[in-house]
Image: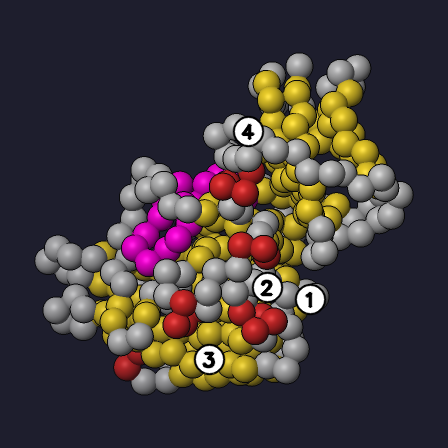
Amino acid sequence: MKKIAASFIFLLVFTSLYAQKPYKGAEVYSKGKVLYGKFQMRMKMIKGSGMLSTFYTIEHYPGGSDPYWAEIDIEVLGRNNAEIMSTNLFINNSNGDLSYSEQQIPLNYSLADDFHIFTIEWTPNFIAWFIDGVEQRRQTGAYVDHMNRAQGYRFNAWISSSPAWVGAIDEDAMPAYQYVDWLEYYSYNGSTQDFTKQWRDDFNSFDASRWAKAEWTFNGNEVDFVKENAYIEDGNLVLAITNPNASLSLTETSIPQSFNANYLAANNEIAITSLNAGNYNTVLYDLTGKVVFLKKMNTSKFSIPCSTIQSGLYIIRISDEDKMFRKKIFVR
């Protein structure tokens, strides 16, 4: 995960407490670690200036008598139509300071308009990145030699504090979503120099034996990672970037006649219908700005179940590229 702005490096400092950053993001991290292998995944990334959607591997012991850092990144920059994939390697020197090798891969298509297959091959001799089976970068030498300890692996969606790198933050693009359809891991056999498939996660459910959801942040990051912004929907792992401040106004905006959004006590649900199906972002907030429900509506009718929602006043916000409306909803 790239932490560079201009000529300096942001040190990654995690905290288990929310730092009250202006935005909320998501990170899902593995409970296990692997040494070498191939990661292959089908993802649709985030589009929007300032935002990043990622997959990366990492092992780090900052400070102490044996400082160690090793990291392999896929990072898609949301700016410029999400047409840039940044490939990064991080290692530490004997003093514990970080060195990095970055290569940005410019593409002539968006990585946010459709799903693409991303691959990292990690061996003792090389690390390579692929998109849809086409090799984009291959690294050998000292950076690869350093990657000799098992690493965990993670997805995250976040906002950098460096506009020079990622562009100015586009709040109008929020909420924004990274979708992961599936992930496969292949072990590496050094004798035969080939890969063997070990497992596949189709994200039909959240496998708590393999994954956990982050509740922290780091320096240079404009989001707090919150559990609510990582969830399973329609066979995808979804990582969302949201703006809680967008919900705090209690002022309602005019709802187009084509929409209807109401709480139905008999079914204990919020029913939303539209005369026209489309790609509408639907977010339900409580009055503190906490997201309690997220969904991308692409049908003419759906509902928000309220069985796990406490009674009280909420704000529902529905938006697309052209319009947004906000309505107060009381859940009994």
Marks 2 and 4 sit apart, C-alpha to C-alpha, by: 26 Å
Label 4 CA crowd tier, 10 Å (few <14, some 14–19, many 20+): many
Residue 204 sits above or below residue 113 on the image: above
What range is drawn magenta here? 213-230
**Residue 145 position by quadrant:** bottom left
Residue 110 sits above or below residue 218 on the image: below
**Do labels 2 and 4 touch, CB within 8 Å?**
no
Residue 212 appears in the rendering: no
Q: Can you identify the residue that label 4 sits on?
A: 286
At label 3, the amino acid type is Gln
Label 3 CA crowd tier, 10 Å (few <14, some 14–19, many 20+): some
Q: Can you identify the residue that label 3 sits on?
A: 104
Marks 3 and 1 sit apart, C-alpha to C-alpha, by: 19 Å
Task: Please state the horizontal and vertical placement of residue 207, each as a whole percent of the image.
Answer: 56, 42
Q: Can you identify the residue that label 1 sits on?
A: 113
**Do labels 2 and 1 touch, CB within 8 Å?**
yes
At label 2, the amino acid type is Lys
Q: Quadrant of the C terminus?
A: top right
At label 4, the amino acid type is Asp
Q: Nearer the viewer, residue 304 or 183?
A: 304
Q: Which mark is residue 53?
A: none
285 to the left or right of 52: right
At label 1, the amino acid type is Asp
Q: Quadrant of the N terminus?
A: bottom left
Task: Please state the horizontal and vertical placement of residue 6, each as a whole percent of the image.
Answer: 31, 75
Residue at (45, 41) in percent of width and height: 226
Q: Can you identify the residue that label 2 sits on?
A: 47
Q: Nearer the viewer, residue 151 or 160?
A: 160
Residue at (17, 61) in percent of width and height: 67
